[in-house]
Image (cartoon, grey):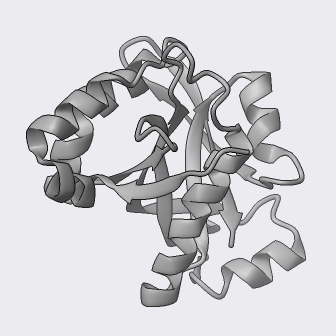
Amino acid sequence: MAEYRIANILDMADVIGEKNLKVLLSGFFCPRNKELQHFVRENAYDFARKKISVTYLIIDEDNLIAAVFALAHKAIEISNEGLSGAKRRKINRYAVLDASSDSYTVSAFLIAQLGKNYAPGMENSITGNALIDAAFEILVKVRHDIGGGIVFLECEDKPGLLRFYQDGQNGFMPFSERYAAPDKIKYIQLFQFF
């Protein structure tokens, strides 16, 4: 596997300058997810400057973006119904059960964006599992510094995506769903203890 480094987008801007960063970001292509492509090219740097979310760039040996992920922090509600006893004991480390709603409100880390660069020649530069591992490398450092232990993400209700996130290596568990306006795309929300 190729060698990569993980770069915080704000640090990258400090090193190469905002103008060069925009050029670098313009080379990110994701025809499978135009929303992600637009985010990386148009919003990632501004969101990081405003502290809405921070994007991390996976940079390859040629100093090109192989993939990206964005992290944020958000409160989520996880229903007590359907949780095993072991999961209830674990979640009790981070939240208290609200008896009236029979759910836990948890402050969790959000993997807000996640995707590979599909520019010509980059399609196979990193695996999805390696990308998830890179996100967790940062999350483990943050957990060490500030605490926490739950991460979540949302993905479209597509069998291949759900298998990827729920498989043994990644181990995310569904906890809710939502529909995005205006096109009513169904998103499954999944969480994991780490």
Rendered location of residue 185, percent (x, y): 52, 18
For the C terminus, which image quadrant? bottom right
Q: Quadrant of residue 2?
A: top right
Name the residue at the front extreme: 62
How many numbered tags mark residues here? Answer: 0
Residue 17 horizontal side relative to residue 81, left or right = left
Foreground: 44 or 19? 19
Foreground: 29 or 84? 29
Foreground: 191 or 67? 67
Residue 88 horizontal side relative to residue 41, left or right = right
* Rendered view: 24 above or below 37: below
Residue, x 58% and y 67% (percent of image)?
137
Rendered location of residue 60, percent (x, y): 51, 43
Residue, x 44% and y 25% (percent of image)?
180
Rendered location of residue 159, percent (x, y): 79, 24
Foreground: 193 or 77? 193
Residue, x 40% and y 61% (percent of image)?
74
Residue 38 horizontal side relative to residue 42, left or right = right
* Rendered view: 95 above or below 187: below
For the N terminus, which image quadrant? top right
Q: Is residue 104 visible?
A: no
* Rendered view: 45 above or below 193: above
Q: Quadrant of residue 83?
A: bottom right
* Rendered view: 31 above or below 15: above
Rendered location of residue 76, percent (x, y): 49, 60
Q: Is residue 164 visible?
A: yes
Residue 6 horizontal side relative to residue 41, left or right = right
